[in-house]
């Protein structure tokens, strides 16, 4: 999984910095003096121990005459604002997963969101954000969805709490589009969808989101998320408990066809409401 991690991006930055520095025949100390940091700092950048600041990356470009490559790498690979810091590693692992199982207690998962739904969620959480910030977040969310379009897409299994169907995020038209997309993805067999109904009793009180990811050459991982925080769990005992919890939720959920019928019914209700407003 290392190639998909944020650490790998730092390592790429460092390796490229070392290669280009050596190509022009200067030492770490010499480069450091030109960009106003110590030679030791340059060594830490090259070993991916320390993350450079943007102004340092810009001065490195000037010193090595690299036409802005380190500034672009910093912005694209190291300081990608499209994902919250606590979610960035999970987003990277999604791309490597062979199987993803999610429980969504309140919102449609990002891998299934429409642009309209994603925008409504982003605005709700960032009421004073500028358009550029909102666009970045929505773009990042939609970009993640390419993994479901690839021929080698992961097995994807989602359990939606009935709350997801009933809370009108973005209004009736946005919700109709969103739920119709969920149904379409399920009908195309890109995702298996179940709904945990209110009638599930105590199981319907489950409130924490859960994402389980399996990989071809690494142990499984669990990711849980709360308000403005997330936890990536890889302790085998904890992951085992997370799988057991997911199995219980899945067992309490409606079967796939009954689940899709409920999602379709909710979508039709929203569509009728949108047409009368």
Image (tube, grey):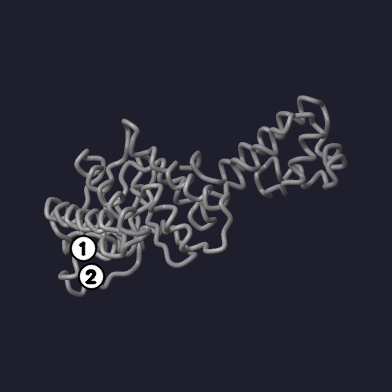
Q: Left or right: 69 with respect to 276?
A: right
Residue in view at x 14 percent, y 59 percent? 254
Which residue is more in the foreground, 171 or 197?
Answer: 171
Q: Secondary structure at mark 2?
A: helix
Which residue is more in the foreground, 247 or 275?
Answer: 275
- Indicate the position of residue 209 as horizontal and vertical percent values: 35, 62
Measure the alpha-carbon separation of dots 2 and 1. 7 Å
Q: Left or right: 3 with respect to 213?
A: right
Q: 10 Å neighbourhood of mark 2: few (<14), some, or many (≥20)?
A: some
The reply to whether discs 2 and 1 touch (Cβ–Cβ < 8 Å) is yes
The tag on residue 196 is 1
**Image quarter for residue 232?**
bottom left
Q: 10 Å neighbourhood of mark 1: few (<14), some, or many (≥20)?
A: many
- The residue carrying mark 2 is 204
Q: Secondary structure at mark 1?
A: strand
Quadrant containing the N terminus in the rendered view: top left
Toward the front, the furthest residue is 276
Quadrant containing the C terminus in the rendered view: bottom left
Q: Is residue 20 above or below residue 240?
A: above
Residue in view at x 40 percent, y 57 percent? 223
Which residue is more in the foreground, 203 or 165?
Answer: 165
- Indicate the position of residue 117 as horizontal and vertical percent values: 38, 53
Q: Is residue 144 above or below residue 171?
A: above
- Indicate the position of residue 25 as horizontal and vertical percent values: 82, 26
- Indicate the position of residue 248 as horizontal and vertical percent values: 20, 64
Q: Is residue 237 visible?
A: no
Q: Is residue 25 visible?
A: yes
Toward the top, the furthest residue is 23
């Amino acid at each position: 999984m290392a190639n998909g991690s944020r650490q790998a991006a730092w390592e790429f930055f460092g390796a490229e910095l070392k290669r280009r520095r050596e190509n022009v025949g200067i030492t770490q100390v010499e480069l450091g003096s030109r960009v106003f940091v110590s030679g030791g700092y340059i060594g830490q950048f090259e070993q991916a121990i320390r993350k450079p600041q943007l102004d340092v990356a810009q001065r490195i470009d000037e010193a090595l005459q690299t036409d802005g490559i380190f500034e672009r790498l910093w912005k694209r690979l190291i300081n990608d604002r499209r994902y919250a810091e606590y979610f960035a590693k999970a987003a990277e692992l999604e791309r490597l997963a062979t199987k993803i199982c999610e429980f969504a207690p309140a919102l449609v998962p990002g891998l299934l969101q429409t642009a309209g739904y994603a925008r409504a969620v982003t605005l709700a959480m960032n009421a004073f954000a500028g358009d550029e910030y909102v666009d970045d977040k929505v773009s990042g969310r939609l970009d993640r969805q390419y993994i479901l379009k690839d021929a080698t897409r992961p097995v994807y299994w989602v359990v939606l709490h009935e709350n997801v169907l009933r809370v009108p995020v973005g209004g009736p038209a946005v919700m109709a589009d969103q739920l119709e997309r969920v149904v379409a993805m399920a009908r195309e067999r890109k995702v298996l969808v179940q709904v945990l109904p209110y009638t599930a009793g105590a199981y319907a009180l489950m409130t924490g989101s859960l994402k389980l990811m399996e990989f071809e050459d690494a142990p499984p991982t669990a990711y849980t998320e709360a308000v403005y925080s997330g936890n990536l769990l890889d302790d085998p005992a904890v992951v085992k408990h997370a799988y057991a919890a997911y199995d219980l939720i899945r067992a309490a959920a409606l079967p796939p066809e009954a689940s899709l019928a409920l999602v379709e019914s909710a979508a039709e209700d929203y569509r009728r409401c949108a047409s009368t407003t």
